[in-house]
Amino acid sequence: MTLRDLWQKGLFYVTVPTCVCCGDALREDDRALCSDCRRSYENMKARDCARCFRPIHRCTCSCDVLDCHFVHRLIKVTRYIKRDADIPSNALVYSLKKDNRLDVECFIADEIFQSLSALDEHPQDAVFTHVPRRSSAVRHFGYDHARRLSLALARLSGAEHTTFFRSKAKHAQKEMHGTDRLQNAQIALRHRYRHTDLRGKRVYLVDDIVTTGASMSCAAMALHAMGAKEIIGVCFSIAYLDS
Ligand SMILES: [Zn+2]
Ligand SMILES: [Zn+2]
């Protein structure tokens, strides 16, 4: 148990944890969401992908942008509906980004891990890495949520994790449109990984949400250039594949 785990555990006993979506107090057996919000979250999860007609958390459909950038499979859990904080799946992502709550981080990591396991992936012999958060956001919030998620998934899978990249983006992706997103999604390979050889390796590339796929594509191109045999996208929610 890390110092942060202990701190969060302590906090749990001195504060009443609330539902990330409606703000109601959580009962002891609730995690991140109250039982009503949990029900509506499960309903959203069960909706079908419009391409393969499987529930979204059981489908690996990629999108055109990612497919062009070597990410032919994308594992996800639920849908993201733009700027609607009343939807539990969105509220979870917003909280992951800004609240620094361990229960939210664990909830999301467990949900993704369940999707990975159900798809009969064998992540233990792969490398986990993540799409880096914008540096100014890391300074502002104090952490990179995608890194934490990817670390948690590597731990659950018994696989290794490497932080290959740092973000060079000047603006938040949500402020950008169309091809500007690809332009803005600049990342840099961290110096010590300049000569890393990923030949023959499978890489799970983790992010919280995929909207246009621009940020993930940018990291995938770099992994491909390092020789990665297969790049599998992993995220909590996606903004497409509407049923
Ligand atoms: Zn609630
Ligand atoms: Zn699908």
Image (cartoon, rainbow, N blue to C red):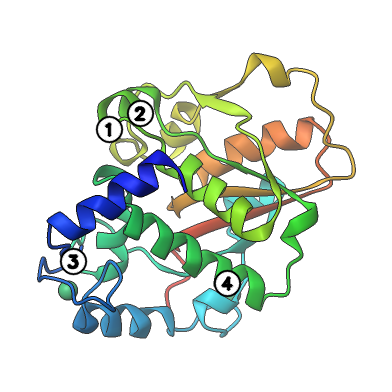
- Dot 4 amino acid type: Ser
Image coordinates of residue 78 in percent, x first then y, are 43, 70
Pointer 4 local density, CA inside 10 Å: few below 14, some 14–19, many at least 20? many
> Picture quarter containing residue 134?
top left
Helix, strand or loop status at disc 2: helix
**Residue 170: x %, y % from top left:** 37, 21
Q: What element carries label 3?
A: loop
> Residue 38 vs residue 55: left or right?
left
Vertical placement of 143 versus 112: above or below?
above
Q: Mark 2 points at which residue?
A: 138
Q: What number is the disc on residue 47?
A: none
Q: Distance between the residues labelled 1 and 4?
A: 28 Å
N-terminal label among 4 and 3: 3
Residue type at mark 1 is: Phe
Q: Do the residues labelled 4 and 2 touch (CB within 8 Å)?
A: no
Q: Is residue 116 above or below residue 41?
A: above
Query: Alpha carbon of mark 2 to alpha carbon of mark 1: how far?
Result: 5 Å
Quarter the C terminus occupies? bottom left
Disc 3 from disc 2: Cα separation: 23 Å
Callout 1: SS: helix
Q: Quote the CA–CA distance across marks 3 and 1.
A: 20 Å
Q: Earlier in the sequence, mark 3 or mark 1?
A: 3
Calculate the distance from the C-alpha at mark 4 to the C-alpha at mark 3. 22 Å
Instruction: Please give the residue where the numbered disc 1 appears in the rendered image.
Output: 141
Residue at the disc numbered 4 = 115
Q: Residues within 10 Å of mark 3 (few under 14, many from 20)?
A: many
Q: Residue at x 24, y 46 (%)?
A: 99
Q: Residue furthest top?
A: 191
> What residue is drawn where x is 83% and y is 45%?
201
